[in-house]
Image (spheres, coloured by chain):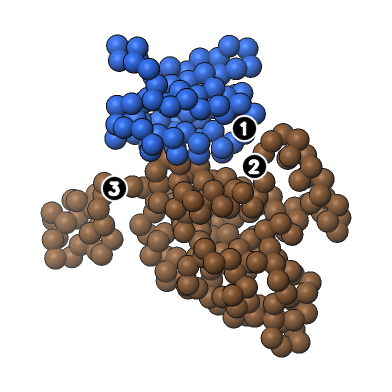
Amino acid sequence: MSTQSLQAPALTLDLKGLLCPMPIVKIAQAIKKVNVGDMVEATATDPGVLADIPAWARTSGNEVVTLERQDKLIRFVVRRLK
Amino acid sequence: MATMVRQMYPEAAPAYAAQPESGPKKLSMIVFSGDMDKVMAAFIIATGAAATGMDVIMFFTFWGLNAIRTGRPTGKGLFGRMLGVMNRGGIDRIGPSRFNFGGVGRWMFKVMMRQRQVTPLPELRQMAIDLGVKLLPCGMSMDVMEIARADLIPEVTDPVGVATFIEHSQQSQTTLFI
């Protein structure tokens, strides 16, 4: 986590209600729309994203800035690194 | 390992060692089954892999061809036409591998998946196409089952054979048979 996490996300996605593989697919499509270094923020309800977003970031070479769960709502921010 | 082989025996390096070792990773899949549940698994894995930046190819052979057919009746000869009627194909018409009960199971699974907001199979296939997944039909199966190129959705590549699949598989880190 870096100090740059204070910067506002370039894009915000609503992934609530979506199940595997759609959250990952939507994030992959969104990250291509922002510049390298910019962030995408999303809210989801599928608990699978808790494992899958970090896995997606590791395999695609991007960064998970935050990933937090409040009750049924999961909010996360990823940053495009390449 | 490949680098070591090249250093020790530069002239004897196998062809695949010349492949770039960086660059995107690759997934090759054989889709043999035409069952709704297995085809669904195949497209979920394909879209997931493409979303992580992998190159993905799917080789559709035998019953798997039903997942990339338009759904119109096929066949030229008597047996071919009989098969075309009994095995209509089309991604909306294929049933689950268990509990299909002449289409009731398919309907039930579709309702249950819609209730959970799971992406329907036709949309999942379109998503795969949009993400750049390559769909390769098996030419030999098409010949045997009397399925013409025009009976397949336009997004598929020209029909290919086993050597093309093996070449893709050699360049892949993951190969699956479904």
Q: Nearer the viewer, mark 1 or mark 3?
A: 1
Q: Check disc 2: other Cα within 10 Å, few if <14, some if 14-19, many if 20+.
A: some
Q: Check disc 1: other Cα within 10 Å, few if <14, some if 14-19, many if 20+.
A: some
Q: Which chain is brown?
A: B
Query: For residue B23, which numbered disc appears in the image?
Result: 3
Name the subunit of mark 3.
B
Residue identified by numbered label 2: B119
Name which residue type carries label 1.
Leu
Name the subunit of mark 2.
B
Looking at the image, is B154 positioned above or below residue B80?
above
> Can residue B79 be seen in the rendering of this structure?
yes
Residue identified by numbered label 1: A18
Q: Does label 2 or label 3 sit earlier along the sequence?
A: 3
Residue depicted at 45% across the width and 31% down the height: A55
Where in the figure is residue B33, as x and y percent of width and height? 65, 60
Q: Are marks 1 and 3 on the same chain?
A: no
Q: Quadrant of residue B71?
A: bottom right
Name which residue type carries label 2.
Thr
Q: CA distance from mark 2 to mark 3?
A: 30 Å
Residue depicted at 77% across the width and 39% down the height: B112
